[in-house]
Image: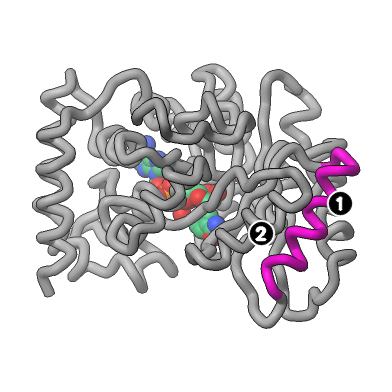
Amino acid sequence: MTDEMPERHPVLQDVELMVGTWAWGDRYIWGFGQEYGREEITAAFEACLENGTTFFDTAEIYGQGKSEQFLGEFIREKPENIRIATKFMPYPWRLRRASLTRALKASLRRLNLARVDLYQIHQPMPPIQPETWMDAMVEALQADLVGAVGVSNYSRDWMDRSQNALARAGYRLASNQVEYSLLNRQIEKNGLLQHCIDQGITVLAYSPLAMGVLTGKYSPEKPVKGIRSAVYNPRLLGRIQPLIQLLNKIGSDHAGKTAAQVALNWVICKGAVPIAGVKTPIHALQNAGALGWRLSDEEIQRLDYVSDKVAKEK
Ligand SMILES: NC(=O)c1ccc[n+]([C@@H]2O[C@H](COP(=O)([O-])OP(=O)(O)OC[C@H]3O[C@@H](n4cnc5c(N)ncnc54)[C@H](OP(=O)(O)O)[C@@H]3O)[C@@H](O)[C@H]2O)c1
């Protein structure tokens, strides 16, 4: 980063890694209540506080409100230094600004909070235009119900329009949450990442471990179970093994870092903030090991090269 780069929004200035809580209460995709449950996520939350990763990302739709509810319960017991980002889903039947305010108040009730640190529009949903939701966000900022505003899955055009709408009222857009990992580098290729960096809008990278695949624990012999396997099928798992091997090799050159830690560090080195989803205290502990060190430029180039190569192979 050079001196001329605009600074991040204050809410994200010191944040290098966020904790994703999509799996907290979600049965359908993540299998909550089967291989893990309340006990594991309670311990995961505790582990996050212990290792200082205290900015949690949730959404009203995760587990149909359960993720927010769990966080609300956990926060009640330990209200220290914790920051929360949640999201508004612009369902097609939500047509007016007032629906954002209603949804925000419902999220705050579940979270047991008077104010959320970062409130994000979960995804674009035309025909409702970005300015409608940003006008509602300005009201929420003025009422001190939210500390900062973000968007998610927004194109450059919709993000810029959101930023302009907020600027007209004297506010700025803090973040755009988009998918970004060594297996999905679309925002690098289409220029969105660099544009965000130039504008001081933080890219919050979701699925930075490709839903667990970049940890290296899945392979054609040990495939991903459930709905995730529709994308991360055995054929893809076979194809990406050279990338997993390189992650492991680079990790071992950094005093035994894991593939997951290297994959998260790569996102950080690119100027984004990974949101790593966790189900257990072990995940939380391990992912925090992505912090406090940096890949070299040469290692980043090698990872870029192999990720491009496995992405192209059919
Ligand atoms: N804005 C959006 O549209 C959007 C979309 C998706 C996600 N998100 C956000 O981004 C967060 C992260 O994305 P994600 O959950 O899809 O994917 P991710 O962070 O790429 O992967 C998370 C999964 O990987 C496995 N895992 C994580 N750390 C591990 C470790 N150290 N060792 C072994 N396995 C580990 C766990 O699943 P298994 O143990 O089952 O493999 C975990 O649930 C979400 O929680 C959510 O907050 C936002």
Q: Nearer the viewer, residue 243 or 125?
A: 125
- SS class, disc 1: helix
Q: Nearer the viewer, residue 276 or 128?
A: 128
82 w.r.t. 186: above or below: above
Between the residue at mark 2 and the residue at mark 1, the CA separation in whole angstroms equals 15 Å
In the image, residue 8 lies at what x, y percent? 53, 34
Asked if the magenta segment contains residue 132, the reply would be yes
- For the C terminus, the image quarter is bottom left
Residue found 35% across the figure and 48% down from its top: 209
Which residue corresponds to mark 1?
A: 139
177 and 214: which is toward the camera:
177
Residue 37 placed where, x, y %?
59, 45
Report the front residue among 268 and 4.
4
Three-letter amino acid code at disc 1? Glu
Kindly identify which numbered label has been placed on residue 121. 2
Q: Quadrant of residue 78?
A: top right
Identified by mark 2, the residue type is Ile
Q: Is residue 106 left or right of residue 91?
A: right
Q: Which x, y percent locates residue 173?
A: 63, 47
Q: Magenta stretch?
A: 129-145
| Horizontal and vertical percent position of residue 260 | 30, 38
Residue 162, placed above or below residue 312 = above
